[in-house]
Amino acid sequence: MLPSTLKAIAHIRPYRIEAQETMILALPIVVTQLAHISLGFVDTVMVGRLGPVALAGVALGNTVFFNTLIFCMGILMAVGPMVSQAFGAGDDESIGRSVRQGLWLAACLSILAFLFIYNGEYILRWLGQTEVNVANAAGYMRAIAWGILPFLGLVALRSFAEAVSRPKAVTAIVIIGVGINIFLNWVLMYGKLGFPAMGLVGTGWASTGVYTFNFLLMLLYVLKQKAFAEYHIFSKLSRPDPQYFRDLFRIGWPIGTSMGIEMSLFMLTVIMMGWLGTTELAAHQVAVQCAAFTFMVPLGIGMASSVRVGQALGKNDPVGARRAGFTGVGISTLFMMFSAVLFLVMPRGIVSLYLDLNEPSNALVVEMAVNLLFFAAIFQVVDGIQVTMMGALRGMKDTYQPMVLSVLSYWGVGLVSGYLLAFHFGYNEVGLWWGLVLGLASAAVLLTRRFHYLSK
């Protein structure tokens, strides 16, 4: 065999090994993410049977809830890089301290998030939404707000488990939760087993029940695992550690802000869809749920890349960290290209999962949703790249500069261009989706350049 061929094989082999290690870690995380988004998918499908007005209400309520949750979740995701780097360095004491402060931070964030979501109707009214849609969303938000604390507690414990390469239990717990969510929706939404039919409010209470169940089961798992005993997570939980609490928040708040800014692009797009009308809002909810579902795969790969990069840096292996980041983005790109093709070749089949295609009252929503799936296909690839690069940078504890790049991309490019195209150039819902495409593409380019620069 030629020396040049042997050299090429030697160069490729570490990437192949990294791809295998990344996929071993990423697969359960991806399944966990898909299970999480399945809760919203199930809610949308079951609420869709109540009609477009109910679907528009859950779109608004879920937007306020989910965007608040994403911001808080992003802050708590600082537990991941802190634990993964400590795990790579074999520092058990730092692992336990990071998880403990993550739980304290979850409790503090829950109070603020609860107050915001519980009173979310005032925000929707201020943003110009119709009284019918606000009324539908309000009951849903007041019910699901009680699930904030257990959800954020789960995020802190989940970040710990994944950072020490033990993600499978989280996956099993969340999958069980999906089944419970379907059952509780059926009982509370439609009034089964002696319960009154609660509609959207029942959906909110079902989600709260599932979040509580998931957290308690995860708590039990961490308590019972002998391998975790050396970290002394709960034996020293009695009071906050000011230094670690500050470190965790210093790394976490830019992550939460970055994720919040990205989600705010989608949230404000929902709000602007509401200005256009109920039909546009319902169609957008269907299309964006489809995009959100496929997005969970690169998001999970990005979380795995964050762990792999962090563990490599903990072992003082910067070459391995660079390889981990670019391997993750390659895997994400391949998957999102595949999902883009599905959106292009079978849009009506996908929309039929949410709406009855044979129902005449759904005709306008169906056609509009099919049209929007074309734009969802366009931004699939860039969306996968930007979220994976964000995860790789998070593994390096580089969080502030990516936050600045997020502001430029999502607000400076995406939000501004979407508003102008929709309301000044007359492209309506199509213009808003072009804004999403441009904002995500900008983030993909800027974050990739940032990782390339830092990992050289």
Image (tube, helix red, strand yellow):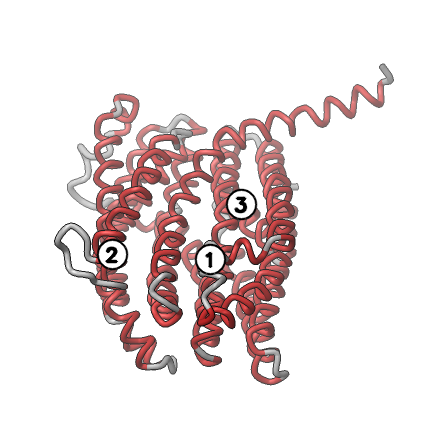
User: Relative to the observer, which residue lies in front, 367 or 385?
Assistant: 367
Identify which amino acid the numbered label 2 is placed on: Ser
Of callouts 1 and 2, which one flags the residue occurring earlier in the amino acid sequence?
2
Label 3: state its secondary structure. Answer: helix
Label 3, label 2: how far apart the Cα atoms are: 27 Å
User: Relative to the observer, which residue lies in front, 349 or 10?
Assistant: 349
Say if residue 450 shows up in the picture: no
* Dot label at residue 110: 2
Quarter assignment of residue 202: bottom left
Position of residue 247 relative to residue 313, above or below, is below
Residue 404 percent location from the top left of the image: 53, 62
Label 3, label 1: how far apart the Cα atoms are: 15 Å
How many callouts does the rendering have? 3
* Dot label at residue 349: none
Residue 134 percent location from the top left of the image: 31, 76
- Disc 3 + disc 2, Cβ < 8 Å: no
Identify which amino acid the numbered label 1 is placed on: Gln
Residue receiving disc 3: 298
Position of residue 161 relative to residue 180, above or below, is above
Residue receiving disc 1: 289
Position of residue 279 relative to residue 181, above or below, is below
Q: Residue at x 62, y 61 (%)?
A: 374
Q: Which quadrant holds the N terminus?
A: top right
Say if residue 456 shows up in the picture: yes
Of callouts 3 and 1, which one flags the residue occurring earlier in the amino acid sequence?
1
In the figure, is residue 373 to the left or right of 307? right
